[in-house]
Image (cartoon, rainbow, N blue to C red):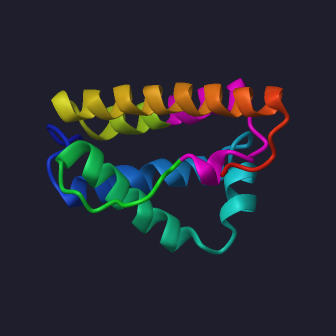
Amino acid sequence: MKNSDITTIDDIKNMVDSFYIEVREDGLIGPVFNEKIGDRWPTHLAKMYTFWETVLLGNHTYFGSPFPSHAQLPVEKKHFDRWLMLFERTVDALFSGTKADEAKWRAGEMAEMFQFKIDHLRKRGKDVIQ
């Protein structure tokens, strides 16, 4: 059932859980995530709840920097495109409204920024983010 918009932490959890079910089963990006995260999915999901709660609801529960853990992943544009498509599809299936639109916009901005930064580091021959 589609809710009107993303307004609570339970909405965030529903979005994150539903999205990562899709990610884990996806033939392109699933192996990348499953290799990186291994058996730490509960920890990763909890971190994603706080990240999106901070970004969308303004409750500052996430502390950290999301990019460094992504910097050395074996990903390229097609992986970011798939990630974004799955994210947008998940949000559209569950929600509609201002926050849902913001979630999709922010996800698109993050995917673009992460891809740019990873490409830049690779061109400079940097293996480690400091």
Residue 85, horizontal then vertical, whole percent: 52, 28
Q: Residue furthest right?
A: 125
Residue 1 seen by the camera: no
Residue 115, horizontal then vertical, whole percent: 63, 29
Q: Quadrant of the N terminus?
A: top left
The stretch of residues the image draws in magenta is 67-86
Is 10 placed above or below 68 here?
Answer: below
**Secondary structure mostly taken by the magenta-highlighted segment of the chain:** helix
Q: Residue at x 14, y 37 (%)?
A: 4
Magenta span includes 89: no
Is 20 placed above or below 2 here?
Answer: below
Question: Is 18 on the left-hand or right-hand side of 55?
Answer: right
Magenta span includes 80: yes
Q: Quadrant of residue 77?
A: top right
Q: Quadrant of residue 50?
A: bottom left
Q: Residue at x 27, y 52 (%)?
A: 54
Is 25 placed above or below 75 here?
Answer: below
Q: Residue at x 25, y 37 (%)?
A: 95
Residue 42 seen by the camera: yes
Q: Nearer the viewer, residue 108 or 6?
A: 108
Q: How many discs mark residues in the rendered view?
A: 0
Residue 46, horizontal then vertical, whole percent: 41, 67
Residue 91, horizontal then vertical, whole percent: 35, 37
